Image (cartoon, helix red, strand yellow):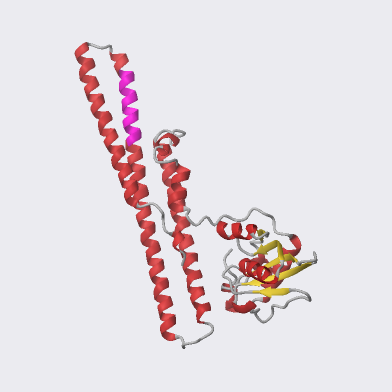
Amino acid sequence: MRSGWWPRIDPGEYRAAGDAARARARELASIRADAARVLSGLGAAAPSWARVRGVLVRAEETELARAGLADALAELTADTRDRLDAVAAAAARDAHDLTATEAPGDPLLDLRRDLVDQRADAVAAEVAEDAETRAGELARRHDADLGGGSGAAPLAGMGGVAAALDRVHRPHHYAPDRAAAEPGLAARLRELCAGVTGPARGWVRLAVARVVDGVGRSGVVVGTSELDGYLRPGVALRDGELVAGNEEWPELSIAAFCAAHGLAGASVVGAYPLPEDVAGYLRAQGFDPSAAPGAWSDAVEDDGDAPDQ
């Protein structure tokens, strides 16, 4: 399970921001009380004081709203950490149980461990998505408390809502690649996915790439997440196609194969959106990565074992 799911900011930082906002609110209240006494002693006109008092009250309410948002984000961040700690602990127990029960030297042991990690990452992704949704709701509520349209100023005091949420709830950045999948490769990927049946559909990952050799000839490499490029029964290569495996992301299996055999990367299409670091690496190696998210669901209709998209 990757460590990048955990919030990168400590709840204590939010609590400190809340305490600072409350201190500013108390200071504004004190200024308002002092000004009222001074103006009362000078016999200042009531309308003038009303305007000043309104400005001070509004500023005090804004600081208290900031404090409330900071407290809520601190609680959300702590809760998210606790939930992710529980996911990691469960994954560690499952991995330990595998080691304790499987026979030494079992060639499938590493695959089963990878599956434990992948399942834990899937649960962690749901936790992170839930945290992001809740953080957005808090920000909208904060804006509404200030009358709508004025929430940006208080949030800017803590670095801006987008920056704050990116730091806390979007460390993984699983943004889909925006490139459109090459039609021919996407169709081939759907054919390959259709050949995978049974429980293996829950963990096998596939990708297809167009590559070029040293004299400019184009070819196709099929990538899989399985060891040594193993293809499940029912998955067959076409004449001239090559296969590569061993990496968690099949696109990386293809990239490693091309590097080892002097092939240049071109288009590569996978069934899932790539993490930005993986997509960036592939681009640096000359590939144009894209995703065909419906590859599994299009391959076999109503198959309950198909991986979630």
Tell me if residue 246 comes above or below residue 147 in the rendering: below
Tell me the quarter of the picture where residue 274 sits.
bottom right
Percent of width and height locating residue 228: 62, 78
Which residue is painted at 26% across and 12% down in the image? 44
Tell me the quarter of the picture where residue 64 sits.
top left
Percent of width and height locating residue 71: 33, 46
- Along the line of sight, which residue is nearer the eye, 210 or 231? 210
Tell me if residue 198 comes above or below residue 282 in the rendering: below
Which residue is painted at 35% across and 44% down in the image? 70
Numbered label tally: 0
Tell me if residue 32 comes above or below residue 82 in the rendering: above
Is 235 on the left-hand or right-hand side of 168?
A: right
Tell me if residue 61 comes above or below residue 288 in the rendering: above
Is 61 on the left-hand or right-hand side of 269?
A: left
Q: Is residue 62 magenta?
A: yes
- Along the line of sight, which residue is nearer the eye, 14 or 258? 258
Q: Is residue 271 visible?
A: yes
Give the residues drawn in magenta, as a range. Answer: 50-63
Q: Is residue 29 magenta?
A: no
Percent of width and height locating residue 3: 44, 62
Tell me the quarter of the picture where residue 268 sits.
bottom right
Is 32 on the left-hand or right-hand side of 90?
A: left
Percent of width and height locating residue 243: 69, 74
Which residue is painted at 46% across and 63% down in the image? 124
